[in-house]
Amino acid sequence: MAKRSAPEVNAGSMADIAFLLLIFFLVTTTIEVDSGIQSKLPPPVPDEVTPPKIKMKNIFQVLVNQDNRLLVENEDMEIKDLTAAAVKFLDNGGGEGPAGCAYCEGERDPESSDNPDKAVISLVNDRQATYNTYVTVYNELVRAYTILRNRESNKRYNESYEDMYLRYKEWPETEKETPEYEKLEEQVNLIRDLFPLKLSEAEPQES
């Protein structure tokens, strides 16, 4: 009796199916990326440009030493108090005449910053300070700007700067030629100009 041979299974298309599945998962899978501090570096300064002179009273010095100790204006400070101190400095409005600040609500101390446009926060971190401390201090300083921008935005437009900026970022691409978008863009830029983020990070220093 002749032996019956087993029928062959055509597996030629299995490779194509596996390849298509691989492409499907590559296209549809979201790969998480590390999120860090969003910061845009300024363009390089040409050699012939002389850096502007800044009055010492317009510089808010923040130092994190190798022990993660915070020194603000050469005095010890807890991180929880940093935001309030930065707000007080930025919002001081101690200038007079053209250097004054009509919208500032600070104490107008002549020994502190003239106005937010001239005020610079200088952050210096020791190389041995922890990354966690660095990020915490950085966030507290940026939060000071956000508080002031929200205050001014609420005062002028009855909307926080954060909400306004979110609408601005999420505005549909196809509707950016409308007067509404142009108005929103103008408002966002105005608030930024009133409280420009001037956070200088000098080269790390050894203690």
Image: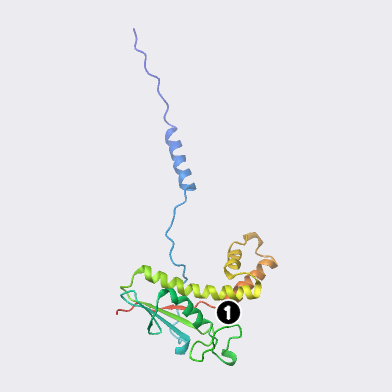
Q: Whole-percent x and y of residue 198?
A: 49, 78
Q: Is residue 53 visible?
A: no
Residue sitting nearer the eye, 26 or 192: 192
6 to the left or right of 104: left
Left or right relative to 136: residue 90:
right
Q: Quadrant of the C terminus?
A: bottom left
Question: Element type at marker 1?
Answer: helix
Residue 207 versus residue 53: which sits nearer the camera? 207
Q: Is residue 75 above or below residue 37?
A: below
Going 44% across and 76% down the picture, which residue do you hit? Answer: 81
Q: Residue furthest right?
A: 179
At 48% from the left and 73% from the top, the residue drawn is: 142
Question: Residue drawn 55% across and 90% down?
Answer: 95
Residue 140 location (% of width, % of height): 45, 73
Callout 1: few (<14), some (14-19), or many (20+) C-alpha neighbours within 10 Å? some
In this figure, which residue is indicated by the disc labeled 1? 194
Q: x, y (%) of residue 177?
A: 67, 65
Q: Is residue 116 left or right of residue 74?
A: right
Identified at 69% across, 65% down, the residue is 178
Q: Position of residue 42 (x, y in %)?
A: 47, 75
Colouring chosen for the image of the structure: rainbow
Note whether 7 is above or below 155 in the view shown. Answer: above
Q: How many marks?
A: 1
Q: Where's the N terminus, which quadrant?
A: top left
Q: Amino acid at mark 1?
A: Leu
Question: Does any portion of residue 165 appear in the rendered image?
Answer: yes
**Side (left or right) of 102 relative to 124:** right
Comparing 120 with 82, the one in front is 82
Q: Return the residue nearer the eye: 31 or 116.
A: 116
